[in-house]
Image (spheres, rainbow, N blue to C red):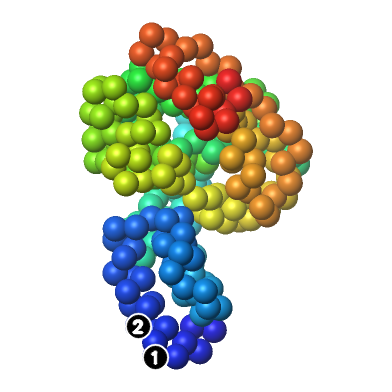
């Protein structure tokens, strides 16, 4: 299909590839939709998207933890200008309809115990839950709702000066949530999972998964603290999280 471009649209594809460095995929689509009203636009997106499907899969290893004994497997996703190494943590005996947590990477919360968010506590909750009920945590390497660690720190600095999490993202030129879930669906397909119980408070994750049946949404119960109460309020009031 890509070979059917005429010379003009080949030129636009080259422009697209150069723009990837500065524009995330979701904003790239909006960018071209705002300018071009031609079916070749969809060829551009298909060609770009096809380059997102180069995924290496590791062997399976054992991982004993304080939450329980799990299996782990890594999925190395080769993007146009990046490599993301996602991790699946799962129980040895997966139920037919497993509980799945899609946990977006948060270095500050997951590794450093930050109180500015609820990410670390959600990860701990999920690992304890799947250990008891069977299932998997997909550690989704899209730091800071997919703006990256560098931009996330800059967003934190803006929040220190009074902006909320959404306003800070917008100030830096990003959407409130830049995450994509193609790799998640790839992983679920690899495990031959067709139906799941999704452990999340975020309804957009429910809507984002198209290739799997979500038979139930399970909530994560985390108490607010003085440092994240405003952050959680914005997630609930402006982003639709069910808290």
- 80 to 181, vertically: above or below: below
Residue sitting nearer the eye, 79 or 69: 79
Q: Quadrant of residue 164?
A: top left
Q: Position of residue 19 (x, y in %)?
A: 31, 65
Circle 2 residue: 11
Instruction: Determine whether label 1 and label 2 are within 8 Å by CB.
Output: yes
Q: Position of residue 228 (x, y in %)?
A: 40, 17
Q: Quadrant of residue 8?
A: bottom left
46 displayed left or right of 146: right
Q: Say how many tags the image has.
A: 2
Residue name at image x 48 percent, y 19 percent: 233
Report helix, strand or loop for mark 1: helix
128 displayed left or right of 175: right
Residue sitting nearer the eye, 159 or 201: 159
Residue 88 visible in this rendered orientation of the protein: yes
Q: Quadrant of residue 147?
A: top left
Q: Disc 1 versus disc 2: distance between alpha carbons?
A: 6 Å
Q: Position of residue 243 (x, y in %)?
A: 58, 20
Circle 1 residue: 7
Using the image, tell me which numbered label, if any, was put on residue 171: none
Report helix, strand or loop for mark 2: helix
Q: In which quadrant will I find the N terminus? A: bottom right
Residue name at image x 54 percent, y 24 percent: 236
Residue name at image x 67 percent, y 27 percent: 218
Residue name at image x 40 percent, y 33 percent: 166
Q: Residues within 10 Å of mark 2 (few under 14, many from 20)?
A: few
Residue 126 visible in this rendered orientation of the protein: no
Q: Residues within 10 Å of mark 1 (few under 14, many from 20)?
A: few
Residue sitting nearer the eye, 26 or 38: 38
- 198 to 6, vertically: above or below: above
């Amino acid at each position: 299909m890509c070979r059917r471009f005429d010379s003009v649209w080949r030129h636009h594809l080259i422009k697209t590839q150069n723009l990837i460095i500065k524009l995330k995929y979701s904003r790239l689509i909006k960018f071209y939709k705002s300018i071009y009203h031609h079916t070749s636009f969809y060829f551009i997106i298909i060609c770009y998207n096809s380059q997102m499907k180069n995924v290496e899969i590791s062997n399976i290893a054992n991982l004993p933890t304080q939450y329980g004994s799990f299996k782990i497997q890594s999925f190395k996703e080769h993007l146009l200008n990046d490599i993301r190494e996602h991790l699946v943590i799962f129980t040895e005996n997966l139920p037919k309809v497993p509980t799945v947590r899609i946990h977006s990477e948060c270095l500050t919360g997951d590794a450093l115990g930050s109180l500015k968010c609820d990410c670390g506590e959600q990860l701990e909750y999920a690992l304890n839950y799947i250990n008891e009920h069977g299932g998997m945590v997909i550690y989704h390497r899209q730091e800071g709702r997919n703006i990256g660690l560098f931009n996330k720190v800059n967003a934190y600095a803006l929040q220190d000066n009074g902006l909320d999490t959404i306003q800070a993202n917008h100030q830096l030129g990003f959407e409130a949530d830049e995450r994509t879930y193609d790799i998640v669906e790839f992983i679920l397909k690899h495990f031959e999972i067709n139906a799941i119980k999704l452990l999340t408070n975020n309804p957009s994750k429910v809507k984002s998964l198209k290739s799997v049946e979500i038979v139930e949404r399970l909530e994560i119960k985390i108490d607010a603290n003085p440092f994240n109460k405003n952050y959680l309020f914005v997630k609930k009031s402006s982003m639709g999280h069910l808290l």
